[in-house]
Amino acid sequence: MAETTLQIAGRHYTVRCRDGEEAHLAHLAGLIERKARLAQQNTPGLTEVRTLLFAALFLADELNDLKREAIGRQQSLALGDDDELAVQAMEALAARIEKLRERLVDPEPGA
């Protein structure tokens, strides 16, 4: 098990992680650090806890927006399934029309 030190909102935190995950944790800590700095810039004098609270809220808001966007994309893709069904229905109708046209142009003998 590896151990790494992360700096967030001016404090150092030592955490354990699986071997090889140190860089990923440092990246995540960097995301939190940027949000913490943003919170401190927008509201000077925040306590450490409130700084981290606002950083978490900023990140949760971004995550929520991304989830809503993903749901919207999934719904638009689902509409694409309806489009595929419509295309299949039109192709079936076109085939029926073609058969009717052939009967009108070349009526069957004895008809």
Image (cartoon, helix red, strand yellow):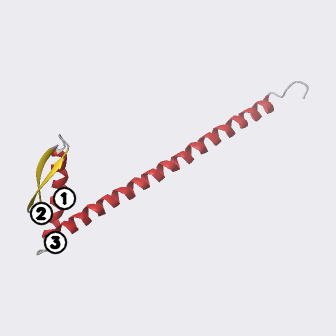
Q: Which mark is residue 9?
A: 2
Image coords of residue 64 (percent x, y): 34, 60
Query: What residue would you read off at disc 3?
Result: 42
Q: Amino acid at mark 1?
A: Ile
Mark nearer the N terminus (2 vs 3) = 2
Is mark 2 in CB contact (under 8 Å) with mark 1? yes
- Assess disc 2: are there few (<14), some (14-19) or many (≥20) residues with their C-alpha within 10 Å of its C-alpha: some
Q: Amino acid at mark 2?
A: Ala
Badge 1 marks a residue whose secondary structure is helix
Depth check, front residue: 32 or 4: 4
Image coords of residue 39 (percent x, y): 17, 68
Image coords of residue 27 (percent x, y): 17, 50
Q: Disc 2 versus disc 3: distance between alpha carbons?
A: 14 Å
Nearest to the eye among marks 3 and 1: give it.
1
Depth check, front residue: 42 or 86: 42
| Residue 95 in which image quadrant | top right
